[in-house]
Amino acid sequence: LGIRLRYRIDAAEGTRFVPQEAPDRTALLSLFVQRQGDDWRMREGTQWYRWYAGPHERIALRPGVSEAFVPFDAQWSSVNGKPRAQAPEEFERALANAARVGFTLGSDRGLGHGVFATGPARLTVLSFEIVR
């Protein structure tokens, strides 16, 4: 069980991908699961409502075809960076009550805070699935 994303990035020669919030860091793609009722503020309890693929499953953005697969039993991280092992029941509740699954672009200092390209670029989703 997990999430699989296959995508292609087309970019002009020499184009770099730069994290919006941390331009000195590597631009990353991360899969995520978001629990229903997330208030986006990480307050009392909702800090466990958004989970991102762990550090080893994040992918540096580069031109070409790439695939991400993250099993649900992998090391996911909460929105505030806590590992799944620290709150396994909360992760299971997020899966059981998931409202959204998808991917974000950012850096290790803000996984969903955006990325910009220094030249023409396009990210095309080739397939996205919840694998059972």
Image (tube, rainbow, N blue to C red):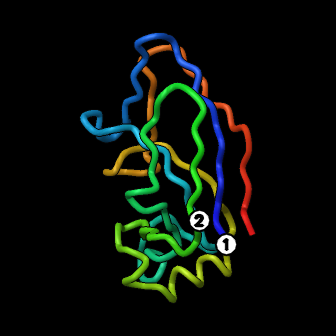
- In percent of the image, x 35 and y 67: which residue is there? 81
Check if mark 1's residue and mark 2's residue have beta carbons within 8 Å.
Answer: yes
Q: What amino acid is labelled 1 in the image? A: Ala
What is the quadrant of the N terminus in the image? bottom right
Secondary structure beneath dot 1 equals: strand
Q: Relative to residue 2, is residue 89 depicted above or below?
A: below
- Give the mark nearest the N terminus, 1 or 2: 2
Q: Residue furthest top?
A: 13
Q: Which mark is residue 26?
A: none
Q: Which mark is residue 98?
A: 1
Task: Choose between 126 and 121: the one closer to the eye.
Answer: 126
Q: Which mark is residue 33?
A: 2
Q: Position of residue 129 (x, y in %)?
A: 74, 56
- In percent of the image, x 44 and y 28: which residue is there? 116
Task: Choose between 116 and 83: the one closer to the eye.
Answer: 83
Q: Residue furthest left?
A: 24
Q: Position of residue 9 (x, y in %)?
A: 58, 28
Q: Position of residue 21 (x, y in %)?
A: 33, 41
Q: What amino acid is labelled 2 in the image? A: Val
12 sits left or right of 4 in the view: left
**How many neighbours does mark 2 have within 10 angstroms: few (below 14), some (14-19), or many (20 or more)?**
many
